[in-house]
Image (spheres, helix red, strand yellow):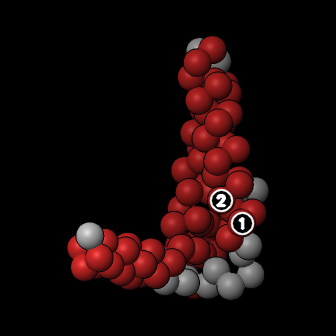
Amino acid sequence: PFLPQVVRVVKTKDTESIALGMYVMQVIGIALWLAHGLHIGDLPLILANSVSFLLSGIILIYKLSTNNYFRIVEEKSAMVIVSALLYN
C-alpha cells in the first residue's frame, strides 16, 4: 500500500495530506516488528518489514523535509547551545 504513495510523494513533493504523527508511529512500529523478526530469525517477517520500513521511512523523511522540521530542530538546537554557553 505504500508504493503508490511513495511514488506520488517523490514526484510531487506534496505531503500536506499526510499526518506526521501517524507516520512517526508507523515507522516506529515497523522498526519494532523488524527488530523482532531479526531477533527470532524469521525471514518473511524480516523481508516484509524491511520493505515497509524503507517505503514508510521515505515518506516520513519527505514529510519532515518539506515542512522544514529539520530546520526548526537545527534552530532550536543552536539556541539551546548558545544559551548554555552564555549562561553557564
The answer to whether the residue labelled 1 contacts the one labelled 2, judged by CB atoms less than 8 Å apart, is: yes
- Where residue 85 appears, x then y in whole percent? 24, 73
Q: What is the quadrant of residue 45 in the picture?
A: top right
- SS label for mark 2: helix
- Please indicate whether residue 88 sits to the left or right of residue 8 in the image: left
Quadrant showing the C terminus: bottom left
Q: Residue furthest front?
A: 88
Q: Position of residue 44 (x, y in %)?
A: 67, 25
Q: Could you tell me which residue is drawn at 64 percent across and 25 percent down?
A: 36
Q: Which residue is mark 1?
A: 21
Query: Could you tell me the amino acid type at mark 2?
Result: Val
Secondary element at image label 1: helix
43 relative position to 79: left or right: right
Mark 1 burial class by Cα count in 10 Å: few <14, some 14-19, many 20+: few
Is the residue 33 above or below the residue 22 in the image? above
Q: Is residue 70 visible?
A: no
Query: Label 2 belongs to which residue?
Result: 24
Work out whether residue 27 can be spotted.
yes
Question: Which of 31 and 49 lies nearest the eye of the viewer?
Answer: 31
Up-down: is 31 above or below 13? above
Which image quarter holds the N terminus? bottom right
Res 51 quadrant in image: top right
Residue name at image x 56 percent, y 57 percent: 57
Type of amino acid at the residue the image marks with label 1 = Gly
